[in-house]
Amino acid sequence: MPAPQPEPVDRYRTFVHLTTRWMDNDVYGHINNVAYYAYFDTAANRYLIDEGGLDIHTSPVIGLVVESKCNYFKPLAYPDALRIGLRVDRLGTSSVTYGIGVFREDPETSAPEPEAAAAGHFVHVFVDRHSRRPTPIPEPLRTALARLTV
């Protein structure tokens, strides 16, 4: 199996701006691997809230993460500004698989670098808030997610 390669910025449909935090750095002077999963989660949920109308406090349907993976291509460090690229690789009845790329912003132009520093995927299964049983993705969320499908 060939080694994963960094993906270009044009493979993503939308971007969420984030900044690294002092606490994201580890003792080796770069962003610790666990912080990338927080970036993934933040980007996906920010999109669901802003574009799909998800109310994280009262919605009868919530998304639970059931799988995630990340490949790291080059280190990032505080105080890097980031763009988290988001797309939908698979949209099912009750689940969605996101493709996510983490891009450093060029400090002079604020444009994302051309290739991802890290990339991976993230799977949400939508469930009833109380029973935690899978349920179809509500139409407003489905419509928003469909816009990101590649």
Image (cartoon, grey):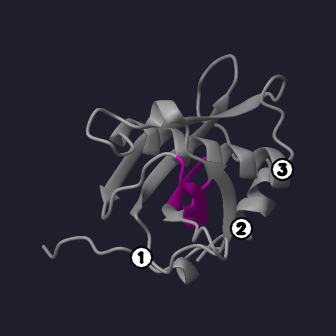
Q: Amino acid at mark 2?
A: Ala
Mark 2 or mark 3, which is nearer the start of the sequence? 3
Determine the residue located farthest toward the top in the rendered image: 130
Residue 55 rendering spot, x and y as whole percentages: 84, 33
Relative vertical location of residue 116 with respect to residue 93 in this rendering, above or below: below
Packing grade of label 2 (10 A; few <14, some 14-19, many >=20) is: some
Q: Secondary structure at mark 2?
A: helix
Residue 37 visible in the displayed image: yes
Residue 129 rendering spot, x and y as whole percentages: 70, 23
Q: Residue at x 57, y 71 (%)?
A: 106
Name the residue carrying label 1.
7
Q: Residue at x 18, y 72 (%)?
A: 3
Q: Amino acid at mark 3?
A: Asp
Packing grade of label 1 (10 A; few <14, some 14-19, many >=20) is: many
Residue 29 vs residue 142, the one in the foreground: 29
Residue 98 falls within the magenta-colored stretch: yes
Based on the displayed image, in which of its 4 quarters is residue 25 positioned? top left
Question: Would residue 77 be found to the left or right of residue 86 on screen?
Answer: left
* Badge nearest the viewer, 3 or 1: 1
Mark 1 or mark 2, which is nearer the start of the sequence? 1
Magenta residues span 79-99
Q: Are marks 3 and 1 in contact (CB under 8 Å)?
A: no
Name the residue carrying label 2.
146
Name the residue carrying label 3.
50
Q: Secondary structure at mark 1?
A: loop
